Amino acid sequence: MAFMKKYLPPILGFFLAYYYYSTNEEFRPEMLQGKKVIVTGASKGIGEQMAYHLAKMGAHVVVTARSKETLKKVVSHCLELGAASAHYIAGSMENMTFAEQFVAQAGKLMGGLDMLILNHITTSPMNLFSGDIHFVRRSMEVNFLSYVVLSVAALPMLKQSDGSIVVVSSMAGKMANPLIAPYSASKFALDGFFSSIRMEHSVTKVNVSITLCILGLINTDTAMKAVSGILNIEASPKEECALEIIKGGALRQEEVYYDNSIWTNLLLGNPGRKLLEFLSLRRYSMDKFINN
């Protein structure tokens, strides 16, 4: 108890000051020049816009989604915008074998990998949960498990390049929302898994950053159709959102918050959780990390 009284206030003060006032390196587009980047869910919406931003920055890009014809158009436009190279590999992330093989194929096309951007999701209508376990399983497999499979497959290449994993998530993965229980569960799972892996990387000195991107409502066609007549809030632009995700990954930030409310980062950023995570590491025997 004496320890808590003596040391907790200054520690908490330090974390609060660091969290709110620390400055990151300024982003420069040339950070992505020549970098080898995978973007999933890139046939439309935020993923498509990320591919175009990366192309303008001179990156090598491999995009994937289910629609082969749409991906062809995305790749063609990437080359017009100045991509160092651009390729597509079509397939479904419901197929874990495809997910694993896709990373290997993309790595061969680019000769390595610097950044893995995980952005795909399965369609999730806004409805009261009716007990559809099949849909819960599908949501977890596509929105969460395939992310794990892709990151595991990419990790050896990312270790070689001191690269980055960028995980596109949602405010629905930080706070409860009605009508999207399966979707929300998959997004909470992303936070739990990748935040834990980030801690493991930190302790074991693996120089592969993990950036979790927490997005509000973005004006993609899919999102606008899903919330029509249900939510009455202003959506944020997908073009700007895509750029903020890329910036966060390039700057190796732990979390990126993008929403039309100034309160989102303040209220959901949760420095208290960061403090508890830091203190919790004191309870672990470091031998477990060294021996593994």
Image (cartoon, rainbow, N blue to C red):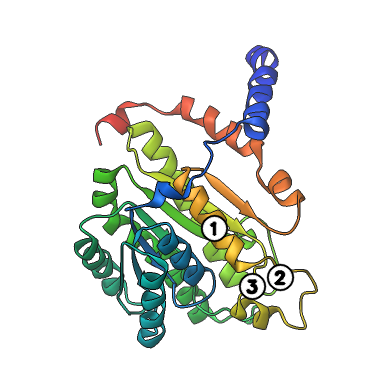
Which disc is residue 106 wearing?
none
- In the image: residue 89, left or right of residue 281: left
Mark 1 surroundings: few (<14), some (14-19) or many (≥20) residues within 10 A: some
Residue positioned 44% across, 61% down in the render: 56
Element assignment for label 2: loop
Mark 1 or 2, nearer chain start: 2
Residue 166 or 23: which is nearer the viewer? Answer: 23
Q: Quadrant of the C terminus?
A: top left
CB atoms at circles 2 and 3 under 8 Å apart? yes
Q: CA distance from mark 1 to mark 3?
A: 26 Å
Residue labelled with disc 1: 243
Q: Position of residue 266 (x, y in %)?
A: 72, 44
Which disc is residue 180 wearing?
3
Q: CA distance from mark 2 to mark 3?
A: 6 Å
Seen in the picture, residue 260 relative to 194 is either above or below; the reply is: below
How many marks the image carries: the answer is: 3
Seen in the picture, residue 18 relative to 127 is either above or below; the reply is: above
Residue labelled with disc 2: 178
Point out the residue furthest to the right here: 232
Q: Position of residue 270 (x, y in %)?
A: 66, 41
Give the mark toward the camera: 1 or 3: 1
Give the mark toward the camera: 1 or 2: 1
Seen in the picture, residue 265 relative to 142 is either above or below; the reply is: above
Mark 1 or 3, nearer chain start: 3
